[in-house]
Image: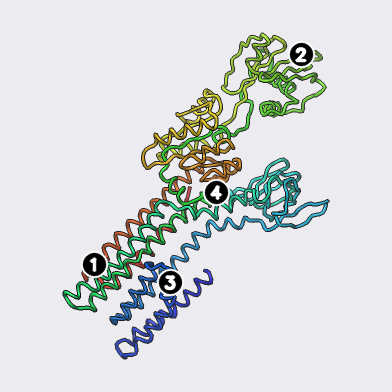
Amino acid sequence: MTKKQKKMVTRLAVSAVFFVIAMCMEKKTSWAWVPFVLSYLAAGYDIPLRACRNLKNGQVFDENFLMTIATFGAFAIGSLEEAVAVMLFYQVGELFNDYAVNKSRKSITDLMDINPEYANLLRDGEEEQVDPYEVEIGDTIIIRPGEKVPLDGIVLEGSSTLDTKALTGESMPAEVEAGQNIVSGSINLTGVLKVQTTKLFDDSTVAKILELVENASSRKAKAEAFITRFARVYTPAVVILAAILAVLPPLILGGWSTWIYRACSFLVVSCPCALVISVPLSFFGGLGAASRQGILMKGSNYLEAMGSLDTAVFDKTGTLTTGKFEVTDVSPVQGSKEALLELAALGEYNSNHPIAQSIKQAYGKEADTSRIGQVEEISGHGIHAQVQVDGVWKELYIGNQKLMERQGVAVTTPAAVLGTTLYLADGTTYLGSIVISDSVRPDVPAMLAGLKKQDVSKLVMLTGDKEEVGKKVAESIGITHVFGNLLPGDKVAKVEQLLKEKPEGKTLAFVGDGINDAPVLARADVGIAMGGIGSDAAVEAADVVIMDDEPSKIVDAICIARKTVGIVKQNIIFAIAVKIAVLILVALGYATMWAAVFGDVGVSVLAILNAIRALSYKK
């Protein structure tokens, strides 16, 4: 409980004591009004002061103004206990709301704990504790167990486990060792790490996350904007109606005190607190629930948009697939697969191309460089390398079909698996083929199944790869709409076409991770970037950031969004329905100010309790 909340609890306790004393004295002495006034002041002295201050600033019709007029009016006609009760219960509702908002805000602001306070900079062999802003790209820092990782970098020495829960929502620590990338905001749990920084603090993962969190509440959902507009029209309207109720009927029928009492009750119940408080609170709770799962949304408008998702469009490489090439098929004409793979590894030894790296990784042994002679790169075709086998030098050609045609090699063994195919030949003698493919992320089938379960009706893959490669990948995971050979501009055009085709009132999300995806991420209704693997440009352009490599978190985001939007609709319908009913009953004289208190404070408390449900989410 905060200091402010403790102070309010004390005030309410004092007010309640005076209220009980006043109720006991009411029938015995004419001085009962004194403890009533003291009770009123203890509970709500700040409400009239706030109303006056807002009047000075031009904010006339707010809940402070309504409460002040209603309670002062009740005092004027002698309804002392009801005037005090209204203020007392109103402040109880405000206290409850304040507690709920703090609880909801905490789920997001807990992320602020990931902000590192210092970095251990290694300078001239000496370790120095400095502000993370002072560390430059390429500097070496030391991270000890229990310390936060202050900047993004590459591990030079050491191995450890990192607590990445605040970033990814995953409770299982991640293991890191020399050569691996680590991101700021995680906590080093075990070993000492020596890390070379790759980004300045302003560009680091932790800085980007904190910026997203701070700006999230500034982008309002349509429902929030509606409530703001509604309150601006609704509040002046009910004040005018209350004034009419207080003046017009008694001029015709008489009974001024009765009608003023009804008008005051009308003002009490008309406060739009339940809507003004519970709707933003619901969205804030939804943003908090998402952040706990490692999903950062840049505003409640995007949370709302995720709730009506109908079309999901995916980039292929790096999003649906790992973006890492691996050997998936080795087809020798004669001899063993190991022998063909060894020839390819020797031939590709000096190449840093990803395909060459995947071949060397599949071979898994240290190459004998004494068996490698001259190597010539043939642009757009492959390589020509002299490789020694059993003491005999061979003229090895490794490359695409164009290289085989150029050398007059007849390819007799077609690739069994679709992917990037390398053909090998000794002079003009065909030796066999090796297929290198990009593997599908293990999490993708669960994501697609979840999206279908959530009634996302259209799943589309866009890729700059060959269309037949894209179709093969799509077929293996269950995506039916595939478009290949696309440049970044083509992807934008395709998304614009899909935006026109989607049903009215539904949204389209694009999921990507690369720099080339930034334009289309910005064009979609909701751009979703993979924060763990995504480029800075993609994360910057996206509206939703998945802080790890799990695309299935998109399903979690949809579930959280739909739950939140459902709660918002429940609160709007419930609050408006109850208020209208009580307003009519009060105006007709069938309900007292006590009913008005329930129509305001009671409805607010129930709506807040309902809004808090948005905070909780189970997979």
Residue at position x 46%, y 66% from top?
98
Q: Is there CB contact under 8 Å for labels 1 and 4?
A: no
Identify whether 90 is placed above or below 447. below
Mark in front: 2 vs 3: 3
Identify whether 458 is placed above or below 393. below
Q: Is there CB contact under 8 Å for labels 3 and 4?
A: no
488 lies left or right of 454: right
Which numbered marker is on residue 585?
A: 1
- Amino acid type assigned to the residue bearing label 4 in the image: Gly
- Nearer-N-terminus badge (1/4): 4
Can residue 188 be seen?
no
Which numbered marker is on residue 294?
A: 4
Label 1 – label 4 distance at C-alpha: 48 Å
- Nearer-N-terminus badge (3/1): 3
Q: Is there CB contact under 8 Å for labels 3 and 1?
A: no
Q: Which residue is mark 3?
A: 56
- Amino acid type assigned to the residue bearing label 3 in the image: Lys
Label 4 crowd (10 A; few <14 / some 14-19 / many >=20): many
Residue at position x 76%, y 45% from top?
157
593 lies left or right of 307: left
